[in-house]
Every structure is written in structure tokens, then in C-alpha cells.
Image: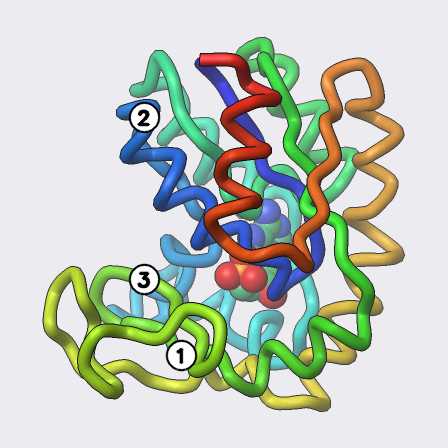
Amino acid sequence: MKLILLGPPGAGKGTLAESLSKKLNLPILSTGNILRDAVTNETQLGKKAKAFMDAGKLVTDDLIIALMDEKLSKCDGFILDGFPRTIAQAEALDKICDIDIALSLDIDDEVIIKRMTGRRTCPKCGMTYHLEHNPPKSKDICDKCSSELIIRSDDNEKVVIDRLETYHKQTKPLKDYYINKLKSLDAALSIDVILNNAIEMIKI
Ligand code: AMP
């Protein structure tokens, strides 16, 4: 199955991707995680991407499309978290393969701004947590790989507002692009309910 997750930053795409990946036994391809690794490892890609990411802007389409072209050619099925994010990226994806379903996580901006200040991320494996809604079992420690959790540098309020603006301008139009494959989820609900609703929509 080829599934994409749409939705604003902080809607819970990463968390849903993790749960669905376990249920469906599908790999996750998260452009955000790939780019953050590239920044940490100071690769060519990371050096080019860093300034865009720090400013809450999108990394250029040519870089992202080249990256995903290579990754997707190796996978039969996947969950895409954070790609595509522009119409140009969606058109490039169409040339690589057919998507089965686009799940859209819908939530108001105000709720996201509140949420993102409570977000904690594992710098090693990319798992995300929330202090209130999805806390790790031990304070500030990743359940999956035991690394110390961090606050992402782009999770501060100013950058979150910029990222939301970028989302509305460049990524939200994808909901119309995928209108025939789109299923919408209320992302303000609890993680368990969102997961159940998603599974119902995918009908496994
Ligand atoms: P995310 O973790 O998905 O919120 O991504 C973090 C940041 O990485 C975004 O704010 C963008 O700067 C960059 N990024 C991730 N995915 C993409 C993409 N598909 N196209 C362009 N930039 C991206």
C-alpha cells in the first residue's frame, strides 16, 4: 500500500505514521527526519537545507524530488510523512508511482501553536512525544531508543507561525490535488481514536 499523510506541522503526522507503520508493516519515509539527519551529519543536502528549515520555509523542490526519487524507487509500499508538500512535488511523485490513499489530518492553527510548544523529539530515531497528550514513559527519554529528547529548534512559536503560513500557501492546495484519494481525519482527537479512524478509512 502507498499512503501519504497530509496536514499542517504539528498535526500528528509523525505519530500516526509510527502507529500505522506497525499495524500495516510498512516503512515510513519522513522527509523532515531525513533532512534533520542530513543537517546533523553536515552532508551536502543538510548544508543546503538548514537555512530553509530554520526559517520555517520549504526546502527547494529540486533537492526534495531528487532525494525522494532515489528513496521511493527502492520501496514497493510506504507511508509518506511530509512529502509531497507542493504541487510540483506531487506531480513528481505521480511520475514515480500511484498513491492509494491520502490521509489528511485536519486541525486549527491555534490548537497547533499550543501543541507545538509541548512537543519533544528524539534526535536519534525521530519519534515525537507531547508533554500532555503523548508523554514518554520516562521523563525526557525516548521510549524507543532511550536517547534524551529535545525541543526542535523549529518548534518555537515564531517559526511555528511561519511554518503554518508556508503550509497554507504551499501544501494545503494538495488537498484539492488529491481530492479523489483524500480521507479527512479530525486531528484534535486522541491518538488512539485517530489511529482507529485511520484504519477504518484504509479498511485493512
Ligand atoms: P517536518 O518535520 O515534516 O515538519 O519538516 C521539517 C522541515 O523540513 C520543514 O519545515 C521544511 O523546512 C523541511 N521539509 C520537510 N519535508 C519537506 C518537503 N517535502 N519539501 C520541502 N521542505 C521539506
* In the depicted structure, whether residue 38 falls above or below residue 147: above
Q: Are marks 2 and 3 in contact (CB under 8 Å)?
A: no
User: Quarter of the picture for ligand 1?
Assistant: bottom right
Helix, strand or loop at mark 2: loop
Helix, strand or loop at mark 3: loop
Image position of 173 (left or right of 144): right
Q: Are marks 1 and 2 in contact (CB under 8 Å)?
A: no
Callout 2 environment at 10 Å: few (<14), some (14 to 19), or many (20+)?
some
* In the depicted structure, whether residue 14 falls above or below residue 183: below
Q: Quadrant of residue 78?
A: top left
Q: Quadrant of residue 26?
A: top left
The one of 201 and 81 positioned closer to us in this rendering: 201
Helix, strand or loop at mark 1: strand
Image position of 174 (left or right of 55): right
First reached walking from the N terminus: tag 2 or tag 3: 2
Callout 3 environment at 10 Å: few (<14), some (14 to 19), or many (20+)?
many
Residue type, numbered disc 3? Gly
Label 1 to label 2, Cα distance in Å? 24 Å
Percent x, y of residue 89: 67, 34
The residue under the point 58% across, 13% down is 100
First reached walking from the N terminus: tag 1 or tag 3: 1
Label 2 to label 3, Cα distance in Å? 17 Å
Can you say which quadrant of the picture contains the N terminus? top left
The residue under the point 50% across, 26% down is 199
Residue type, numbered disc 1? Arg
Percent x, y of residue 165: 84, 68
First reached walking from the N terminus: tag 1 or tag 2: 2
Q: Quadrant of residue 123?
A: bottom left
Which residue has dot 3 on it? 126
Image position of 190 (left or right of 183): left
Which residue has dot 1 on it? 120
Which residue has dot 2 on it? 26
